[in-house]
Amino acid sequence: MRKAPKDVAAKLTTILNAWKTLQPAKTFGGMTYDQFVAKIQPSFDHRKTIADLQLDLIGAQDRRDDADKISLKAAALVVNGVKGDPTEGDNSVLYEAMGYIRKSARKTGLTHKTKSD
């Protein structure tokens, strides 16, 4: 069964701390403490890269959201311009093509409810 990355990091950190604290001069598995640190360092380097990328992603998403606010305001101006244009208006094909419901296609909201006994 594959271990979760968080569990692997915790295990490696525990091994490093125990070895350094209790037997720093002793060799295990054919490696000194420093050789072991060098061997497992890529695991920690990649974790740092992932953490940095996640922060970059959050920043990029925030910048996108800020840009979207500006873009939606510009889009509202365009749509309102189409609605206010005397040759187009809110009943035009262009208005509908922009994703809106033409005035003539809207429901009136009037309902005829039947009385139930």
Image: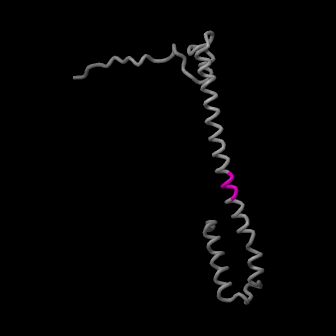
| Farthest-out residue, top | 87
* Residue pictured at 73% horizontal, 90% vertical: 26
Establish if 70 lies above or below 89. Answer: below
**Residue 35, quarter of picture:** bottom right
Tell me the residue at 61%/15% (across/down): 93
The x and y percentages for residue 13 are 65, 75
Q: Is 14 situated left or right of 30 in this image?
A: left
Tell me the chief SS of the magenta region.
helix
Given residues 83 and 10, the one toward you in this image is: 83
Find residue 68 and report its horizontal and vertical position in percent: 63, 37
User: Where residue 19 appears, x then y in whole percent?
Assistant: 67, 84
Relative to 105, say whether 48 is above or below.
below
Query: Is residue 78 located in the magenta-colored stretch of the structure?
Result: no
Which part of the image, by quadrant, shows the C terminus? Answer: top left
Q: What span is colored magenta in the figure? A: 52-56
| In the rendered image, the vertical position of residue 66 relative to residue 115, given as above or below | below
**Left or right: 34, with 9 as reference point:** right
Q: In the rendered image, which quarter contains the N terminus? A: bottom right
